[in-house]
Image (spheres, rainbow, N blue to C red):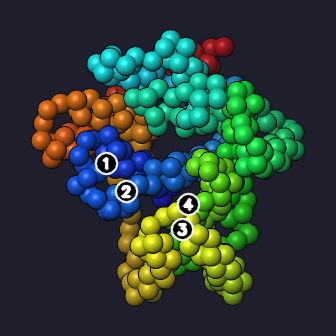
Amino acid sequence: MRNVYLELIRGIAALVVFSGHITLYINGFREVLGKATMLVNWGTEAVIVFFLLSGTVIRLSMDAKPKSKLEFIQKRVARILPLYVVAIILTILITLIARNVPSLSIVIGNLLFLQTLQGYICPTIWANMPLWSLSFEVFFYLIYAITIGKHQQKLLLMWFIISIFTIIIQWLFPLSGLFGHLTIMFAYSSIWLLGYYLVDISKYIKFNLIQSSVWIGLLPMTSRLNFSDEYFLAAKHFIVSCTIIPLFIYLINQEKTFPEANKGIKWKWFLWITVYSVILIFNFHSQSLLISKIIYAILPFLIIFILSLHKNKLISIHINQEFSLFIGQISYALYIIHTPVMYAVNFLSLHLSIKISLSVIIPLIFAYILEYYVHPPIARKIIGCGKRI
C-alpha cells in the first residue's frame, strides 16, 4: 500500500521542478519575477528528493511484498519504459519543429538511459533536460536487482562502500568517458541507498514535527554551499539529502504513535545546532546573494516560531488522501513531459500570461491522460509477458 505522505512529497517535488522550469523556458517570465525566482529555483534539490524517496519506496515495497530479480526488473520496466518512450517521441517532435534535431547516437543513448548532463557517454537531449535523472534511476534499479537474493545485505553494503568511495573520486578528480559515467552513477547511488536504509534508521531514531521541520530548514543553506566548481557534486547532495531524512522518518511513522520521539531530545538539538553552526560558517563564504544568505540563515528559526505557535492546529490537519495519491501518481509523467511542452508553447506568439497558463494546464492534462489511460494497459501487457517467460 502506497504511503500517502510520501506520495504527496513525490508530487510536491515534481511540482517544484515544474514551476522552476516555467521561469527557465518561458521567455520573459524570469524577468518579471526578478529576484523572486529564487523561490522556485530548487529543481536539483527536488531531484535529490526523488532519489532519496525512490530508495525508501523500493525498500517499503520489497519488505511488504518481496520479489525475485526478474519480477523486480519487470515491474520497473513496466513503470518507467512506456511513458519514457512517449516522452522521447514528444521531445524529438519538438526538436524537429525547432530545426535542431539531435543525432541518432544521442537519441539511441537516451533510449538506452546512458545520458547525463555532463555527457560522459551521451548528452541529454536538449529539449528535455529533466531526462538526465532517469538514467540514474535506471542504474540504481539495475544494481539493486543484482543484489536481490540470499547475499543481499552483503552486496548492499559493498555497493554503499563503493558509492562513498566514488563520492570522493568525483570530488577530487576530473572525470570523462565511461569511467566518469560509472563514477557519477555510483556516487549518486549513495543517496538512493540512504533512502533505502532510512527504513532501518526509522526503527531506532524518531523525530517529531518541529525536529524534522528544522532539519528541512537547513536544506536551502546546505544546497548553496560551494564545495567545488562542479555544481552536480554528489558529496554536497549527499549532505543535502541528510537534511531531508528526519522529515522522511517522521512521515514514514506518521500513522503510528511514538512517545520516544521526544526522548533524547537534548542530543538531537545539540546535533542540529552543531550542524547549523558549521553550515552557517560556510554559507557566508558561498557565492549566493547576501540577502539569500540571510534568509537561509534565519529560515530554521522562522520555522520553529511558526510551528510553535500553530503546532496543535498543524498536527490536527488531515491530508487529503485522494489528492496526495493523485499528485504522486501523475508526478512521473509530469516530470518527463513538461519541458518539451513548454518549449512548444514558447514557440507561439502569445501574451506572456497565456503562455504561462498553457505551460501549466497542458502538461497537467497530458500527465493525467498518460498515467491513467495510456500507461495502465501497456504496463499490464509488459507484466503479462513477463509472467509467461
Please tell me in which quadrant of the rendered image residue 246 appears.
Answer: bottom right
Q: Are marks 2 and 4 in contact (CB under 8 Å)?
A: no
What is the three-letter code of the residue carrying label 2? Answer: Val
> Crowdedness of circle 2 by 10 Å Cα count: few (<14), some, many (20+)?
some
Distance (Cα) linking label 2 and label 3: 15 Å
Which residue is pictured at 62% across the width and 48% down the height? 230
Between 7 and 230, the residue placed more toward the observer is 230
Asked whether residue 76 appears in the rendered view, the answer is no
Please tell me in which quadrant of the rendered image residue 349 appears.
Answer: top left
> Crowdedness of circle 3 by 10 Å Cα count: few (<14), some, many (20+)?
many
Q: Which residue is mark 3?
A: 221
Q: Which residue is mark 4?
A: 223
What is the three-letter code of the residue carrying label 1? Answer: Thr
When the figure is inspected, residue 142 is found, relative to residue 27, above or below; the finding is above
Dot placed on the residue nearer the N-terminal end, 2 or 1:
1
| Numbered circle sitting on residue 40 | 2
Q: Quadrant of the C terminus?
A: top right
The secondary element bearing badge 3 is classed as helix
Which residue is pictured at 40% across the width and 77% down the height? 314
Q: Are marks 2 and 1 in contact (CB under 8 Å)?
A: yes
Dot placed on the residue nearer the N-terminal end, 3 or 1:
1
Asked whether residue 270 appears in the rendered view, the answer is yes
Q: Is residue 169 left or right of residue 359?
A: right
